Amino acid sequence: MASKLFSPLTIKKITLKNRIVISPMCQYSSVDGFANDWHLVHLGSRASGGVGLIIQEATAVSPEARISPSDLGIWKDEHIEKLKTINEFIVSQNAIPGIQLAHAGRKASVSAPWMGNKKLDFVHGGWQTVAPSAIAYHEDEPFQPEALDKTGIQKVIEDFKAATKRAVEAGYQVMEIHGAHGYLLHQFLSPLTNTRTDEYGGSFENRIRFTLEILEAVQSEWPSDLPLFIRISATDWAEGGWNPEESVKLSKILKEKGVDLIDVSSGGLVSHQQIQLKPGYQVEFAEKIKNEAAILTGAVGLITEANQAEEILQNNQADLVLFARESLRDPNLPLHFAKELNEDILWPKQYARAKV
């Protein structure tokens, strides 16, 4: 039986050569938002390693949208040149370049993981964070986020729109909006972080309003014939939070509005979350959304083996499988998976002598 992991998938005018996707992974290696040779080698090596789609790390739509001062950005035109060079190389390896646009909200202004992942105060290079409500992620943080007013909300929407226009110029062929992991869109979705009493808070319809407005802004600049994904956290893993039923309900609406695929993750919103970790622990959410919302989904989270990924697809639990840490351990993951699944795929001609 032919492997489904190595079967193509066409979404709008883009055909992925296989169902293996590099999940967005922050590298914390930028200065002033600029990509550099680290990003070229990091992303490029995974393109030559045989993946179908590479989704670039959470890329900030404004300086204050960054998680850390070292995050990648696309808030000014000068960022485009290097990103375009990276994308041209990815395409040369018969892979598809994608970008994840993001705003960290209250989880912004922290140091890189290897520098402690600590909230930065204003003296140490930090900045004022924003959120739907003035609720900090940790109680002991040096300052609280500011609740966005209508002007602030409109600025974020315009930032996403302008970033999308730059993403088109830079040559991305898949767009993903980051609505997961406790970042700004997710903060609006969940009643644990959104206690607003205006049209952006309270009811389900109000809490999803900001996400839908961001979507509309992105769609105003993103070509209608190119794939559009949204990553969501299917559950907060916390009582009273965003849940799988709301995720299905939102996914149905997103499909109606033209979203092609839901990239299904979970958690990240609150520090008291209780995640039940196990191999493929989030796949059930991708399956639920795929079946109940009738939309393409991507599965991610502790998926590390070829047969595991193949089984997810064969069981129709998802349409794409995203790899994060496992792809850091092995940039040539698809080449090795193909051998395990007895699939004969093209290797880069420079490496072909190592194939047998």
Image: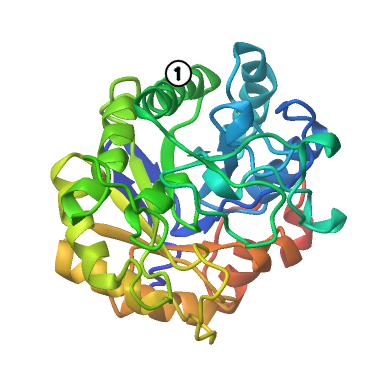
Tell me the kind of residue under disc 1: Ala
Residue visible at 60% across and 76% down in the picture: 304
Image: 223 above or below 199: above
| Mark 1 surroundings within 10 Å by alpha-carbon count, few (fewer than 14), some (14 through 19), many (20 or more) | many
Residue visible at 77% across and 45% down in the picture: 120
Image: 298 above or below 303: above
Query: Splitting the image into 4 quarters, where does residue 282 fall?
Result: bottom left
On the question of residue 302 being in view, the answer is yes
On the question of residue 341 being in view, the answer is no
Image: 53 above or below 285: above
Q: Is residue 122 left or right of residue 313?
A: right
- Toward the top, the furthest residue is 77
Q: Number of numbered discs present?
A: 1
Query: Splitting the image into 4 quarters, where does residue 277 fall?
Result: bottom right
Residue visible at 53% across and 29% down in the picture: 61
Q: Quadrant of the N terminus?
A: bottom left
Q: Is residue 283 left or right of residue 57?
A: left
Residue on which disc 1 sits: 162
Q: Position of residue 88 (x, y in %)?
A: 61, 27
Query: Is 115 in front, or is 135?
Result: 135
Q: Position of residue 47 (x, y in %)?
A: 63, 46
State the SS at label 1: helix
Q: Position of residue 265 (x, y in %)?
A: 44, 65
Q: Is residue 297 left or right of residue 55?
A: left
Colour scheme in the image?
A: rainbow
Q: Quadrant of the C terminus?
A: bottom right
Q: Is residue 212 left or right of residue 312?
A: left
Query: Is 219 in front, or is 247?
Result: 247
